[in-house]
Image: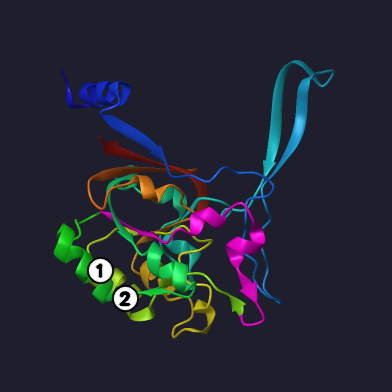
Amino acid sequence: MSILYELVRAVRTGSVEVVDLTAPLTSSTPILQLPAPFGNTMGFGLEEISHYDERGPAWYWNNIHTGEHTGTHLDAPVHWVTARDGEDVSRIAPMKLVAPAAVIDVSPRVADDPDFLLEVSDIRDWEAEHGALIAGSWLFIRTGWDARSGSQKDFLNVDDAGPHTPGIAPHCAKWLAEEAPVIGVGVETVGTDAGQAGGFDPPFPCHSFLLGAGKYGLTQLQNLDSLPPVGAVVIVAPLPIVGGSGSPARVLALVER
């Protein structure tokens, strides 16, 4: 039997579990809010075309209205000025959309500090226990922030000093971009950068360094607690939007049980 048929049989028998890492898209899905004078994305919306009625007696369908960076989505390099001539989402090679995932769990530390920043030393400690990061893999950062995804207020966590969400320290983002063998990073928050990253040097270092290096970002992931530290394979399925800076995506993980 071929390897692919073996995989299908393993999925059907449950020896390989398919874990959905995608947040459902609804009108209440949290979205990024930038301060004036910057433009903002629209939230997700459905506009009914017909629903088994005089507009279409046998069919139901909708128009959808959304931004590229709404809900669980992929950031393509061209999203950031450091890669203004880089790949748009339609040009990402399909083989790159199937990759291993490493999962580092910092949720206990985030519970005590919503402004927690991942350091290179944290990754080195993880590698000492689980082995070196695999070339071409994703690094997923589990913070537990997906538990807040039902509320825009709790998810963005904004006060007078701005948003407070966990992320990656600037020098760690630079290391991930320039030295680590990963294809990109995935997070549970609204963006790959920390809430306070607008004040970092450079501002929004994950976007600046990683996208500038031709790597990718995945945001608003869920169910990372169902993945092992190593061993999962992730399938990322964005829309191939020509000229698109990113796309909402269905993100699935295959996990041996």
> Magenta residues?
137-161
Query: At numbered mark 2, what does the secondary structure look like: helix, strand or loop?
Result: loop
Residue 25 is situated, as x and y percent measured from the top left of the image, at 60, 44
Is the residue marked by circle 1 packed among few (<14), some (14-19), or many (20+) residues within 10 Å? Answer: some
Numbered badge on residue 119? 2
Pointer 1 residue: 123
Asked whether 121 or 8 is in front, the reply is 121
Asked whether 235 or 238 is in front, the reply is 235
Identity of the residue furthest to the top in this view: 58
Is residue 207 visible to us here? no
**With respect to residue 177, does 1 lie above or below?**
above
Residue 137 is situated, as x and y percent measured from the top left of the image, at 26, 54
Residue 193 is situated, as x and y percent measured from the top left of the image, at 47, 70
- Residue appearing at x 70%, y 36% in the figure: 63
- Quick check: is 70 in the magenta stretch? no
| Side of 19 where 152 appears, left or right | right
Query: In which quarter of the view is residue 8 placed?
Result: top left
Asked whether 27 or 74 is in front, the reply is 27
* Contact flag, marks 2 and 1 (Cβ < 8 Å): yes
Residue 243 is situated, as x and y percent measured from the top left of the image, at 52, 54
- Quick check: is 155 in the magenta stretch? yes
Q: Quadrant of the N terminus?
A: top left
| Side of 169 where 193 appears, left or right | right
| Side of 102 where 208 appears, left or right | right
Query: At numbered mark 1, what does the secondary structure look like: helix, strand or loop?
Result: helix
- Residue appearing at x 25%, y 28% in the figure: 15
**With respect to residue 194, does 239 lie above or below?**
above
